[in-house]
């Protein structure tokens, strides 16, 4: 088990695709509405999506959410090009190795798959403006993506503590009328997670945690992965959503700070 990772997604200036089904704009991968997707047409072995970050930006992690219909045999290849190289990805642009698309074999109960790409430590991509995601071995099926999250991850030297909470935020309700009749309002059930980093170093708090909280508050989503190591359950160890509750840190001991990260997932 590796220490948890997280990151604030970079803003997406534009998105284009090799092919798009009617009504499924590539720009949708930059919003936070999980029910709004980019979707390719059927009929090809591979499809690609190009993300424009607006300028050369450092990144080392990509998380994809809402991969409706994704199959275990599908692969993902990441390429990166600088602003000077352009969106045509000429020779000399960075090319990664194709790997399995889905982050793990155990699918979320929603059926909406997730993908996690971690840059190779030996040869990471340079700061880039354009990122091309190529989905292959599709067997003529359509690709669907709700959200593309790209960023520079943080990973504290000391992991979160035991006592982590994993649950569900039920947006529905169940009550009784005066005559004892059930009054039920069914709604979405959002996955939630609460973890406590009880020994975060002071420099990590000042360089990572406090700037992150000041940027996202309770309104902007982050990506949180409780264990990024390859595992069958890794899809279910990924969250994308806003932080809820207290946004502060506590300095309870000289050896470290405490940050309690509570998140409600938009990714189902």
Image (cartoon, rainbow, N blue to C red):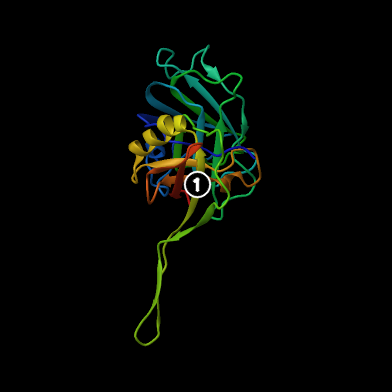
Label 1 neighbour load within 10 Å: few <14, some 14-19, many 20+ = some
Number of on-image labels: 1
Instruction: Pick out the residue farthest to the front.
Output: 254
Residue 121 image point, x, y percent = 59, 23
Residue 158 image point, x, y percent = 56, 37
Task: Using the image as rendered, state which of residue 163 and residue 38 is in the foreground.
Answer: 163
Q: Which residue is mark 1?
A: 196
Q: Residue at x 38, y 44 (%)?
A: 248
Q: Is residue 7 left or right of residue 70?
A: left
Callout 1: helix, strand or loop? strand
Residue 174 image point, x, y percent = 41, 73
Q: Is residue 213 visible?
A: yes
In the image, is residue 94 above or below residue 44? Answer: above
Task: Using the image as rendered, state which of residue 139 and residue 73 is in the foreground.
Answer: 73
Instruction: Pick out the residue farthest to the bottom.
Output: 179
Residue 78 image point, x, y percent = 54, 27
Task: Using the image as rendered, state which of residue 177 and residue 22 is in the foreground.
Answer: 177
Q: Is residue 243 left or right of residue 68?
A: left
Asked which quadrant contains residue 202, the reply is: top left
Q: Quadrant of the N terminus?
A: top right
Q: Residue at x 56, y 41 (%)?
A: 141
Q: Residue at x 39, y 26 (%)?
A: 53
Q: Is residue 151 visible?
A: no
Task: Using the image as rendered, state which of residue 91 and residue 124 is in the foreground.
Answer: 124
């Amino acid at each position: 088990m590796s220490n948890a990772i997280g990151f604030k997604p970079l803003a997406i200036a534009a998105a284009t695709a090799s092919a798009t089904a009617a009504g499924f704009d590539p720009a949708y991968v930059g919003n936070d509405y999980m029910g709004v997707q980019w979707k390719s047409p059927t009929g090809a072995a591979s499809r690609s999506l190009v993300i424009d970050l607006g300028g050369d930006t450092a990144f080392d992690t990509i998380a994809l959410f809402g991969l409706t219909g994704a199959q275990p045999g599908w692969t993902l290849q990441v390429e990166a090009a600088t602003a000077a190289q352009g969106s045509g990805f000429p020779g000399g642009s960075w090319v990664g190795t194709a790997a399995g698309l889905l982050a793990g074999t155990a699918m979320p109960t929603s059926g909406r798959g997730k993908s996690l790409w971690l840059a190779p430590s030996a040869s990471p991509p340079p700061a880039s403006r354009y990122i091309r995601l190529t989905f292959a071995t599709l067997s003529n099926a359509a690709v669907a993506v709700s959200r593309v999250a790209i960023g520079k991850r943080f990973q504290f030297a000391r992991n979160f503590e035991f006592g982590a909470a994993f649950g569900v935020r039920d947006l529905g309700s169940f009550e009784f009328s005066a005559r004892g009749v059930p009054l039920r309002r069914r709604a979405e059930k959002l996955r939630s997670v609460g973890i406590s980093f009880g020994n975060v170093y002071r420099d990590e708090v000042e360089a990572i945690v406090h700037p992150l909280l000041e940027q996202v508050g309770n309104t902007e989503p982050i990506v949180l992965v409780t264990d990024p190591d390859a595992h069958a359950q890794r899809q279910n160890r990924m969250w994308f959503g806003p932080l809820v509750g207290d946004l502060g840190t506590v300095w309870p001991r000289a050896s470290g700070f405490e940050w309690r990260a509570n998140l409600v997932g938009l990714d189902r």
